[in-house]
Amino acid sequence: MNHAKLKKIIIIQPDLFDYRRLVYNRLSEYVELIVVTDKLSVSKEACEFRIIQLDTIRCRGLIWKKRLIKTVLAEKPDALWIAASLSEFSSVLLTLIMRFTKTKSLLHGQGLVRRCYQSRKYKFLLSIWLLFSDQYIAYERVGMDSMSKCAFSSKKLTYINNRFEDLPTKDLDISRQETLSIMFVGRIRKGSNLGLLIEALRIINEESTHPIELHVVGDGVDAELEVWSSINWLFCHGAIHNPIELKEIASLCSLGVYPGDAGLSILTYMKYKLPVICHNDFRHNGPETSYITPGYDGWHFKRNNLDSLVMTLRKALFQSDLDLFRLNAVTTFNSLHSTSYAKEMYDAVLATIEVTNNDSNH
């Protein structure tokens, strides 16, 4: 196929985060890229692609991006990559309009794994949206499989593992830890459930002469923050994005724990050679938790269950070969990052155009 036919991609999503920026910077090496969003969590100066920021109207759970349809029609893209949120009504309508312009529309979402996506109403509405789209790209295989089981057309389903735009970690040397410490990475909010982890460690440390330290990387708001600041084995580092600083903190730790509803923090742990503990209720977790293989590169505990978390921490810290688990964790990370995320996005768009064009020629 002549790749020159593809000149422009527009990505439509509600927010632009730094890890996505790195993916899109790489993607812009292949195509002319425009990202349409209503919120920016990165600096525009760090972006190597065009950004169009639109205001939104919110009403009864629905979101309307002002001028979205007009903007896209004016830009005349070859393909759209759309965050598959049914609440984004302007995106849904845009997909229908694009059928008449023969512009390819690819939806990108988590599938039907999470509990909030499992109602009959949601499945029905998503099936209608997919009818007017050319492809659904799930965040990982589990998400794709969840849609296949619900009679969605398998011809329109595929997946790309949601991850960073990272190269595999070359240094696989695992240095033995002299002390046991835990790393938490993520926004400090109700859903992170950091208080559960602190309480679990409080129980374990009461029985130990050498307390296990907890290193918290992230910012946010929690009513307990002021109380936690007095704990002598708890170290709050704030939000850190510099990989060198993250590596330094991770080198002090034995494993990474996300006590709440986990997402990309899982990959951050693995990247820095930390096996992972998270809960096993995938209806609430992000898709990235499916990358963990219990007993190989991590462990699971029961969601919101203090006794289960304490038991899992004890097993990981005192009854496991942590050096082996750390090696397995970075091996998992490397297997996920053996190819470029951006290149897989590019190939998915090309494949969609090729299939639909071939179908129209017959």
Image (cartoon, helix red, strand yellow):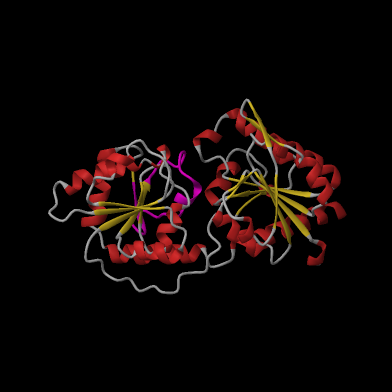
Quadrant (top left/top right/bottom left/bottom right) for the N terminus = bottom right
Q: Hey, which quadrant is residue 96 in on the image?
A: top right
285 within the magenta span = yes
Q: Is residue 131 left or right of residue 245?
A: right
- Closest to the observer, 158 or 286: 286
Does residue 88 show up?
Answer: yes
Asked if 174 appears above or below 292 in the picture, the reply is below
- Tell me residue 296's x, y (percent): 35, 59
Q: Is residue 52 left or right of residue 75?
A: left
Asked if 260 appears above or below 269 in the picture, the reply is above
Asked if 196 appears above or below 352 in the picture, the reply is above
Residue at the extreme top: 60
Residue under the point 41% across and 50% down:
218
- Closest to the observer, 273 or 352: 273
Count of marks overlaid on the render: 0
Quadrant (top left/top right/bottom left/bottom right) for the C terminus = bottom right
Residue under the point 47% across and 66% down:
334
246 within the magenta span = no
Q: Hey, which quadrant is residue 347 in on the image?
A: bottom right
- Tell me residue 9's x, y (percent): 74, 55
- Tell me residue 134's x, y (percent): 74, 47
Residue at the extreme right: 361
- Tell me residue 145's x, y (percent): 56, 46
- Closest to the observer, 80 or 238: 238
Magenta region: 279-300
Q: Is residue 316 left or right of residue 211?
A: right
Does residue 1 show up?
Answer: no
